[in-house]
Image: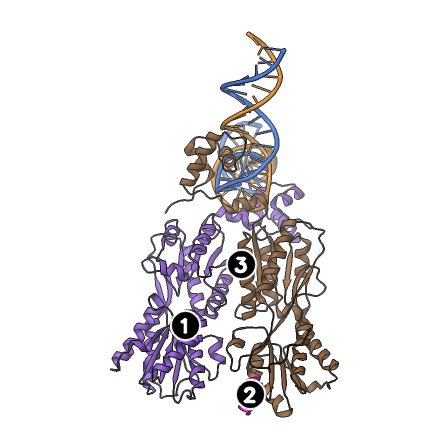
Chain colours: A purple, B brown, C blue, D orange
Amino acid sequence: MKKKITLKDIANELSVSISTVSKALNDSFEISEETKKKIKEYAKQHNFKPNTLALSLQNQRSKTLGILIPNMLNHFFAQVFSGIEKVANNRGYKIITCITNDSYEKEVETMDLLANGSDIDGFILSMSKETEIKEQFQHFKDNIEDGIPIVMFDRVAEGVDVDKVIVNDEEGAYFATKHLINSNCKHIAFITTVAKYSIGKLRKEGYLRALKEALLPIDETMIVEVEDPKEYDEVIAQLFNKKKIDGILATNELSAITAMKIAQKKGMKIPKDLSVIGFSNGILSRHSTPKLTTVSQHGELMGETATHMLIDAIEKNNPAYASVTKVIKTTLVERESTKQLVKVKR
Amino acid sequence: MKKKITLKDIANELSVSISTVSKALNDSFEISEETKKKIKEYAKQHNFKPNTLALSLQNQRSKTLGILIPNMLNHFFAQVFSGIEKVANNRGYKIITCITNDSYEKEVETMDLLANGSDIDGFILSMSKETEIKEQFQHFKDNIEDGIPIVMFDRVAEGVDVDKVIVNDEEGAYFATKHLINSNCKHIAFITTVAKYSIGKLRKEGYLRALKEALLPIDETMIVEVEDPKEYDEVIAQLFNKKKIDGILATNELSAITAMKIAQKKGMKIPKDLSVIGFSNGILSRHSTPKLTTVSQHGELMGETATHMLIDAIEKNNPAYASVTKVIKTTLVERESTKQLVKVKR
DNA sequence: TGATTTTAGGATATCGATTGTATAGTTATT
DNA sequence: AATAACTATACAATCGATATCCTAAAATCA
């Protein structure tokens, strides 16, 4: 077992003081060229690397970001994570990651644990569902007060003054719905996960705005809330039984795909009899039959943006800095589940 | 901006020495009950948490694991990662994650960076493809020599003496092929990614063994290697054009699903005319039409197992410890792409 | 040649903890 | 009453670095 070499070891070996070694390696003018050369060579030969822990302790800065993500099995979050990792790495930061499993408690505990020392220089996070429902944001506020910068993405806390990266959910849903309307759909259903909170709520608003604008009737029974993926089948099948539907906007991939399957079983042709658009452009959409038209949220870009914002905030270190919210524009990725139509100006 | 409270602050405030505070908080017998109580109360009130960095420096142990994963967008790796995070968290470890993007260079750089100080106590990793192809394992060996434990999973380096968690790839492929044979397939194709290295190679061996055992002819043109997902369509379509096929074993989800689509376009019924089995039980398999029968690798369990092994190794701290390889048994998850048959004893 | 400035490097404090040793003050022993 | 033993706490070294302040010796100047 080879032991890590330290400044002290070099100092002893070359019979100089520790401070001389440190200065030499940092190319200080106080040290003669000759000595510097000797020390640097020895250091290189023995593969000296300064101890990060000691450095962090000294500098009160760890060059590490804390990442809190509700669930890594979700493709969208995996995309965001990839974006975060990429930028963090490029800019010389490490990342400590925690999966909250949508638990409020784990979120609080983890932030507590990490914010602790100078373990991390800042947080990038997407709130857990539980936190969103409880509307308990004290742990965020505590960290901000402690001077630890936070950037939230996607599921962000309203009323908490931090940098945020979100998607134009309302607009995305609006344009998607409009796209359905333009391809002649008159009876458009909206399948959503909890519509009470931020994202779901905004998407619903976008859906409604498009309908109103097109003077289409709004039918609350055409709006179904789904929660547990296990119940998708049943809930969506019921919708088809009760209603005549020729268009669907769904707030996630899986419910969109479930809807397509059910419709196909009923003998409907997609997109001839039914057009479907989903949200979050994941793998399922790309490989379903037919391939699903989706509103892409550009997860990777969100991650990259959030990371740049956080590192900028850390390195600026300006406590009076006003918080910023960046909106990443969604894009409608047209595939096979909607009719091709002449490009609409938008 | 509230400032972090330190031992020193408490000491000053209560007019005692720093060591008294430290010992009191660690419940040392050297300190009187009265003083302990006073100090503990003050600490609790002011939410004192010892600085992790200082502790790590002192203990030469960071309670942090370094995780190297080729690609987080791959569902299998995301599963493993979830397993790792879960166990690490439960056992009080943090994780620093790096995505290697299958690059040898990034793998080496990251390990270098992290192994550096006492930044991390050990590594969990799956080799990058490039490393596997180059067969350059010096960076692993260096770390082992430095006394930093490593656990490899899935893509492991042969000839490197570390703990490993793998899947019974050969056997998994063997049983899958046998399952196809038992459901009356006579012309079974094998679609694989690079079959030269570890995993692909083993799966091919399993496939061949099953054929031999059933006295079925081995036809090299029924074995196709695919590389880039973009070419899946073309390569697999060619296979169908050239050959009569009634069964397919594919080493990943996507090629299996692509094969199903092509077959369906040709008018074949699944599983009546064609049975298909894929590897790695991801989301695609669960939501394709028909749902894909797959060999599940139990990613989450692999992650959990690897993490337990690593932490055990760290905490045992026994350098003479002989390395262990654990094999996670694959399971055949029967869905709609294969015929139901009477359970075969295995 | 003696005083002053450079030059090159050493000594020390610090970051925030732990831990072993030293030392007051009090109680017990003879 | 003098000394031993014990109690409670302070002091100091350490982990591995950086940064400020000092100090010998050499070089320059008058």
The answer to whether residue A152 is seen in the rendering is yes
* Of marks 2 and 1, the one in the foreground: 2
Q: Please state the horizontal and vertical placement of residue A60, each as a whole percent of the image.
A: 47, 48
Above or below B320: residue A18: above
The quadrant holding residue B30 is: top right
* Residue nearer the viewer, A8 or A62: A62
Amino acid at dot 2: Ile
Above or below A75: residue B181: below
- The residue sitting at 46% across, 30% down in the picture is B34
Residue B262 got which mark?
A: 2
- The residue sitting at 31% across, 58% down in the picture is A159
Instruction: Identify the element where label 2 is drawn.
Output: helix
Magenta highlight range: B259-271
Magenta segment includes B162: no
Amino acid at dot 1: Gln
**Badge 1 density bin: few <14, some 14–19, many ≥20, Cα 10 Å:** many
Please state if A330 lies on the left or on the right of A35 as rendered. left
Residue A297 got which mark?
A: 1
For the view shown, which residue lies furthest in the front direction?
B342
Respond whether the residues carrying marks 3 and 1 are from the same subunit. Answer: no
Q: Check the picture and name the quadrant holding the C terminus of chain A.
A: bottom left
CA distance separating discs 3 and 1: 28 Å
Q: Please state the horizontal and vertical placement of residue B107, each as a whole percent of the image.
A: 60, 63
- The residue sitting at 38% across, 86% down in the picture is A274
| 2 or 3: tag closer to the N-terminus | 3
Q: Name the chain letter of the residue that bears numbered label 2.
A: B
Amino acid at dot 3: Lys
Q: Which residue is mark 3?
A: B86
CA distance separating discs 2 and 3: 39 Å
